Every structure is written in structure tokens, then in C-alpha cells.
Image: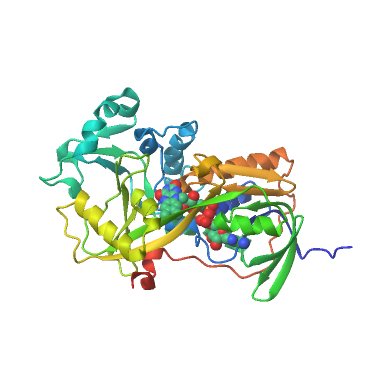
């Protein structure tokens, strides 16, 4: 006979990135007795490495990678904008909007090759080529020969997002490691102190950590894939407020630049796109050199010589796809009391939470009538953004 658990929950969520936190907030709004467990700090996984772009899919459409889920992604910017304005499913008025929109720019060679595509009706409804007079400052230079487009897709401060999602629910967010899983009965350990709890449903939103958790639950499916990236951070006297993708020849932007601030308020450009994907084959020093070269090729009128460059290795965690290609929608798999989920994009966190909430209802898991509080337990705290960790610059 098993001993009674110390605590009961309707739903236990393992993993406090954007996916788990959004889900926790939505389930608690709906009256569920939901608890979230985080083994490091909130946002410590992929979430704090994200560029904060709320994709609407235009970037993919432009490069011909339109898919069945393009309507789903197109719905994300308006959904997030409603939340940012305090009119949406979660109040995100406290979250700093880094930029209301982004830019996409093409170099002279790509512009001529893609002229027909830009002229298509479908694309005209999604993006607008700008007149040179309206170019952001970074492209207003006599040597710039390409074209700049404006994308109506916002960019968020991901640290502020994690805070805004977690703050109202801190009493339901616990620090610790699941050390035993027996069906939906879990034992959590925090520095030797243990607590057991029984849940009606467990949800795994631990990003890359889902694989180890699935093992603990004795499961070998669903399977995960990881896509490594070698991102680059640049710090120094840089143009402000740059959120822009450079169109490349592949279905991925050649480079994506987002602007952030380090702990002293200095400007940081964070570089992703093809540079980060191809860069995994390079050493840190080679990647820093490649980033300098790419910036010199694309923005030759800016002097980066006094800037500091640093690299960041991070893996994207996703469901395993045929041929390792990237998934283009959220992924949810539910069986025997355990749901495994990957949002695949930060922008998809609301869509993922809605899917899981539907799944709970289908399983007839409704909110408990009694909503007693949880026992007191240590809170995991919040992760810093990588560019705010000074040791990463050395
Ligand atoms: C470099 C980069 C840039 C990106 N840019 C964007 C972007 O601009 N826009 C966009 O939409 N998407 C972007 N993404 C994708 C986006 O970041 C991810 O899809 C999203 O953050 C995944 O959120 P998550 O909550 O599923 O996972 P994660 O953020 O990885 O969170 C998982 C959490 O689970 C915790 N955890 C792990 N194991 C356990 C365990 N055993 N028990 C308890 N907790 C555990 C981790 O500490 C972590 O806090 C980017 C990704 C990367 C890597």
C-alpha cells in the first residue's frame, strides 16, 4: 500500500519556461489546482535565449517556406498585442515592448531575384516595402543598395515576460528535481528536502529536459530532436533599436539582429539566423570572426572594430521530425496521465496552452472544487538574460 501523498494537485507542470508558465497562468485562471516545478530558475532554458520575436510567419512566407500552419502563426501577433494592451487572455501590460515591428532587408542581389515575389498580391498584403525616407537609421546610408520592408510583428523583453507570467502565481511555483515518478505520483527533491504529491495529470514542458523526464516516467516516446545554434552577442557603440532580418538565399534569414541591453545598460546586438545555424561547425573564435565578417559585408558603413563579440551555444528542443526538419507548429502528446509538449516557438506558447487545456477537458479533468493553497516550498527565482551575465563576455 502506498502512503498518502503530502499534497494533491489537478495538474503538475514540469518546466518553467514560457510554455509552462503560460499554461500555469491559464489553468489557474480556469480554477485548476495547478503547480509548476522548475529545477533551475524560471526562464533558464531556451526562453531566455530567444530573440523575443512574436512571429507572424511573414519571414517564412517570403522565403517560400509557407506551410499548413501559416494561419496559426499569423494569429499570434494580434493575440500577443491584445495581452500587451491588457485586453487579452493574460495581462502582459508590465512587459516591455522592445519594438512594435521589425524590418526585413534584402541586399541588392537578392532584391532583383525576388522582385516578382515581392510584387505578388499575397506578399503585398503582409509586408510593405518602405520608401527610402522611412528607412530606420541603420539603413539610411548612401551605400545601402537593397530594399527594406516592415513586418508587423512585435518584439518583447523575454525577462519581463517571464516575470509577468510568474508573478501572480509564485505560490504555485516550486523549485526542485523530480526524483521519482510512479504514474502520476511524484517525489520532488530540493537540496535533500523531499515532498510527494499526487496529480491527476502531469504536463512536461521542460524543453530539452523533457527527454530525461520521459525516461524517469519509463517512456521512450515521444522522441525529441535538438537543433544546435551558435548565437553571437555584440556589445559597444551600436545603432539603437535594430530588429531586422536579412533575407538570404535559403529559407532562413542570413542574419537576424535584435537589440538588448547588458547589466550596465550598454547596447547589445544579438545575432541569429543562418549565422547561428552554420556557426555550430565553427569554434568560438571562428564564429566571432565570421560574425565580424558578415556584419562588415552587410553593414559596411558601421564601424564594429571597437565592439566586443561573444558566442552563446544553445539547443532548440523539439519533437523529432522526419529528416530532422524543423516543426512548424506546436506539439502535444498525451497518454496515461502524462502530456509531453514543445511549443517550438515562444510565440506559440498561448496556442500550446489552449491545446493542453482542451486535452484536459477531453480527458474529463475539470478544476477541483476545493482550491486550498499549496504548502510552502522554495521558489526557484528568475534566470538572468545571457548578455547580462558578465562572465559570458570574457
Ligand atoms: C537562440 C534562440 C532564439 C529564439 N528566438 C525565438 C524568437 O525570437 N521567437 C520565438 O517565437 N521563438 C524563439 N525561439 C524558440 C523559443 O525560445 C522556444 O520555443 C521556447 O522558449 C521554448 O519554451 P519552453 O518553455 O518549451 O522551454 P524552455 O524555455 O527550454 O524551458 C524549459 C524549462 O524547464 C526546465 N527544466 C528542464 N528540466 C527540468 C526538470 N527535470 N524538472 C523541472 N524543470 C526542468 C528548464 O530549466 C527550463 O526553465 C528561440 C530559441 C532559441 C534557442
Which residue in the rendered view is the most extreme toward the left? 142
Q: Horizontal placement of 38 versus 135: left or right?
A: right
* Quarter of the rendering occupied by the C terminus: bottom left
When the figure is inspected, residue 291 is found, relative to residue 88, above or below; the finding is: below
| Residue 235 to residue 64: above or below | below
The quarter of the image holding the N terminus is bottom right
**Residue 81 point in image, percent of width and height:** 42, 42
Indicate the position of residue 360 as horizontal and vertical percent values. 69, 43
Q: Is residue 34 left or right of residue 156?
A: right
Q: What residue sits 19% from the left and 66% below the top? A: 306
Task: Return the residue nearer the eye: 105 or 315.
Answer: 315
Residue 118 can be seen in this image: yes
Position of residue 12 relative to residue 262, above or below, is: above
Question: Measuring 69% from the left and 63% from the top, which residue is drawn there?
Answer: 374
Instruction: Report the residue that reaches farthest toward the bottom.
Output: 192
Give the image's coloring scheme: rainbow
Does residue 89 appear in this view?
A: no
Choose top left, top right, bottom left or bottom right for residue 353.
top right
Residue at 75%, 47% (x, y): give it. 336
Residue sitting nearer the eye, 173 or 218: 218
Please identify the quarter of the rendering in which residue 194 is found. Answer: bottom right
Q: How many marks?
A: 0
The quadrant holding residue 207 is: bottom right
The spot of residue 195 in percent (x, y) is 72, 68
Outermost residue on the top side: it is 121
How far across and how far down the image is residue 187, in percent? 72, 65
12 sits to left or right of 321 = right
- The extreme right residue here reads 1
Amino acid at each position: 500500500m502506498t502512503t498518502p501523498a503530502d499534497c494533491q494537485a489537478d495538474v503538475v507542470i514540469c518546466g518553467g519556461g514560457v510554455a509552462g508558465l503560460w499554461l500555469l497562468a491559464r489553468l489557474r485562471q480556469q480554477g485548476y489546482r495547478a503547480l509548476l516545478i522548475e529545477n533551475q530558475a524560471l526562464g533558464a532554458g531556451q526562453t531566455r535565449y530567444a530573440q523575443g520575436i512574436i512571429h507572424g510567419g511573414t519571414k517564412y512566407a517570403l522565403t517560400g517556406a509557407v506551410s499548413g500552419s501559416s494561419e496559426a502563426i499569423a494569429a499570434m501577433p494580434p493575440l500577443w498585442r491584445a495581452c500587451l494592451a491588457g485586453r487579452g487572455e493574460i495581462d502582459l501590460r508590465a512587459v516591455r515592448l522592445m519594438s512594435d515591428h521589425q524590418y526585413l532587408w534584402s541586399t541588392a542581389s537578392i532584391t532583383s531575384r525576388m522582385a516578382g515575389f515581392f510584387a505578388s498580391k499575397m506578399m503585398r498584403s503582409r509586408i510593405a516595402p518602405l520608401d527610402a525616407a522611412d528607412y530606420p537609421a541603420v539603413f539610411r546610408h548612401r551605400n545601402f543598395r537593397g530594399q527594406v520592408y516592415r513586418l508587423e510583428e512585435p518584439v518583447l523583453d523575454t525577462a519581463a515576460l517571464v516575470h509577468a507570467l510568474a508573478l501572480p502565481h509564485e505560490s504555485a511555483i516550486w523549485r526542485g528535481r523530480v526524483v521519482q515518478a510512479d504514474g502520476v505520483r511524484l517525489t520532488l527533491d530540493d537540496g535533500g528536502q523531499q515532498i510527494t504529491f499526487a496529480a491527476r495529470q502531469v504536463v512536461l514542458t521542460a524543453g530539452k529536459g523533457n527527454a530525461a523526464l520521459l525516461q524517469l516516467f519509463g517512456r521512450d516516446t515521444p522522441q525529441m530532436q535538438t537543433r544546435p545554434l551558435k548565437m553571437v552577442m555584440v556589445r559597444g557603440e551600436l545603432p539603437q533599436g535594430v530588429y531586422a532580418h536579412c533575407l538570404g538565399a535559403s529559407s532562413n534569414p542570413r542574419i537576424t539582429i535584435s537589440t538588448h541591453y547588458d547589466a550596465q545598460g550598454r547596447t547589445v546586438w544579438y545575432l541569429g539566423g543562418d549565422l547561428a545555424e552554420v556557426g555550430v561547425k565553427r569554434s568560438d573564435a571562428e564564429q566571432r570572426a565570421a560574425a565580424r565578417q558578415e556584419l562588415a559585408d552587410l553593414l559596411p558603413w558601421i564601424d564594429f572594430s571597437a565592439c566586443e563579440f561573444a558566442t552563446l551555444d544553445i539547443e532548440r528542443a523539439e519533437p523529432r521530425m522526419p529528416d530532422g526538419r524543423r516543426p512548424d507548429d506546436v506539439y502535444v502528446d498525451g497518454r496515461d496521465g502524462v502530456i509531453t509538449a514543445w511549443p517550438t516557438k515562444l510565440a506559440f506558447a498561448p496556442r500550446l496552452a489552449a491545446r493542453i487545456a482542451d486535452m484536459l477537458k477531453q480527458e474529463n479533468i475539470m478544476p477541483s472544487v476545493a482550491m486550498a493553497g499549496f504548502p510552502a516550498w522554495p521558489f526557484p527565482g528568475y534566470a538572468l538574460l545571457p548578455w547580462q551575465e558578465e562572465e559570458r563576455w570574457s
